[in-house]
């Protein structure tokens, strides 16, 4: 029903769409996509979604076409009640469709976009301003958790990694704390259609992230927007980085411990170091780790006492990495790969026409190979 602006309230059995007045639809304060430091007033949530969710296109679409019945939002009663007690006056919290609800609210009240004159003007001049919204109502959050988890974690509209982790945490926290971590990981994984290891790693990284937020990012020049959660998730997936945060260099029994399961083990000064290395930009505009491809090198440096000390003292990651055994492994891998590629090229060269570019590449390969060969012979003599 595009563009519905009036009509009688339609009481429909759960969980089929019913038509609910927009003034009783509330934005979700527990929306996993909201940053931790955002206050939960409706105006603040609207401002955040305006800035971060490309709301203009959605407002324009609804303005021109109305709100389609097939795009029903998903909500739960604000306070506990059973299905038969929900009517048009029942306040509902929208748990799926907050961006759509924000667009609808702006169309109804353009002053919500006061800081964005063009957006406000668009809302004021809209052809359609729906005030009765198709809404699928569930009795409580538990009834809709599996749907939302699958849809946004492994399904058709995946969230960014931080929002995924926050939603996984919501699911996890609803399970009885008396059950083992392993059981809860497995159940949440079943809910979202993922693997228990992914659930475990996400919760572990979120634990570290939440500690950083509670400590105001340890005084570093960081905020939620400056932290690439996927990079933190990757980094804490390395045993030696996680073990460093848990003090494993002092007690080998702590190697590989997950912080979410052992929160008292976290050494906060070391978490501050990891965040600094991963996310604080230097004068050249790059971080000390630079990008995700170097996480494995960082793990190797952290594992090696001498390399770690050099890195902490200010040497580059590349310089510190040379001290570790990782350089030998990398060199061997590169040599094996180069040898295989050259064998393939040698089998094709008889069928390739001469060109100056190809000859220059071949000549460079010869020079590099001679340099490597000469250096290795010198090391043999040493």
Image: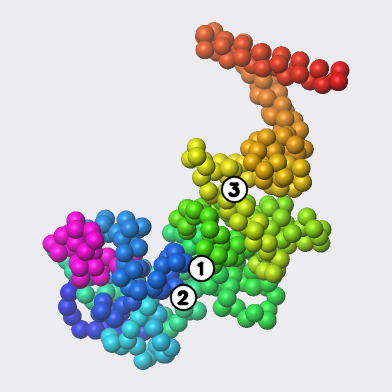
Query: Residue drawn 19% across and 58% down?
Result: 117
Query: Residue drawn 68% across and 64% down?
Result: 266
Q: Residues within 10 Å of mark 2 (few under 14, many from 20)?
A: some
Secondary structure that dominates the magenta span? helix
Q: Report x, y in % for residue 101.
A: 30, 69
Query: Residue drawn 66% across and 13% down?
Result: 367
Camera-side residue: 311 or 234? 311
Mark toward the viewer: 1 or 3: 3
Q: Report x, y in % for residue 299.
A: 69, 47
**Which residue lies under the disc numbered 1?**
167
Q: Which mark is residue 326?
A: none
Q: Is residue 39 above or below residue 60?
A: below
- Asked whether the viewer can see residue 295, the reply is yes
Range of residues picked out in magenta: 98-126
Camera-side residue: 202 or 38? 38
Quote the CA–CA distance across marks 2 and 3: 39 Å
Locate residue 346 relative to residue 162 in the image: left or right.
right
**Which residue lies under the disc numbered 2?**
144
- Asked whether the viewer can see residue 256, the reply is no
Q: Residues within 10 Å of mark 1 (few under 14, many from 20)?
A: many
Q: Is residue 159 magenta?
A: no
Q: Quadrant of the N terminus?
A: bottom left
Q: Residues within 10 Å of mark 3 (few under 14, many from 20)?
A: some
Query: Residue drawn 55% across and 65% down?
Result: 215
Locate residue 67 relative to residue 177 in the image: left or right.
left
Q: Which mark is residue 277?
A: 3
């Amino acid at each position: 029903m595009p563009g519905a602006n009036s009509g009688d309230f339609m009481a429909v059995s759960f969980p089929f769409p019913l038509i609910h007045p927009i003034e009783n639809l509330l934005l979700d304060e527990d929306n996993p996509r909201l940053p931790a430091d955002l206050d939960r007033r409706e105006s603040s949530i609207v401002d955040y979604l305006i800035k971060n969710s490309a709301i203009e296109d959605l407002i324009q679409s609804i303005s021109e076409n109305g709100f389609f019945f097939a795009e029903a939002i998903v909500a739960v009663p604000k306070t506990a009640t059973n299905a038969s007690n929900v009517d048009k006056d029942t306040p509902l919290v929208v748990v799926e469709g907050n961006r759509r609800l924000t667009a609808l609210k702006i169309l109804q009240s353009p002053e919500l976009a006061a800081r964005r004159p063009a957006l406000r003007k668009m809302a004021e001049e809209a052809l359609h301003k729906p005030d009765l919204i198709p809404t699928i109502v569930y009795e409580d959050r538990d009834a809709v958790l599996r749907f939302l988890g699958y849809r946004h974690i492994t399904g058709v509209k995946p969230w960014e990694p931080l929002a995924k982790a926050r939603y996984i945490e919501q699911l996890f926290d609803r399970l009885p704390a008396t059950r083992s971590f392993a059981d809860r990981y497995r159940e949440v994984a079943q809910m979202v259609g993922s693997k228990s290891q992914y659930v475990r790693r996400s919760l572990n990284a979120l634990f570290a992230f939440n500690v950083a937020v509670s400590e105001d990012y340890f005084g570093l020049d960081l905020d939620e927007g400056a932290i690439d959660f996927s990079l933190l998730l990757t980094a804490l997936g390395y045993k030696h980085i996680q073990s460093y945060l848990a003090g494993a260099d002092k007690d080998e029994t702590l190697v590989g411990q997950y912080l979410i399961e052992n929160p008292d083990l976290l050494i906060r000064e070391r978490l501050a170091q990891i965040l600094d290395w991963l996310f604080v930009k230097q004068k050249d505009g790059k971080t000390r780790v630079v990008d995700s491809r170097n996480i494995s090198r960082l793990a190797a440096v952290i594992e090696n006492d001498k390399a770690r000390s050099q890195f902490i003292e200010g040497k580059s990651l590349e310089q510190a990495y040379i001290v570790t055994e990782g350089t030998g492994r990398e060199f061997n891998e590169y040599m094996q790969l180069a040898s295989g590629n050259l064998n393939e090229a040698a089998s094709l060269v008889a069928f390739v026409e001469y060109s100056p570019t190809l000859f220059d590449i071949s000549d460079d390969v010869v020079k590099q190979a001679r340099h490597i060969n000469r250096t290795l012979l010198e090391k043999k003599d040493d």
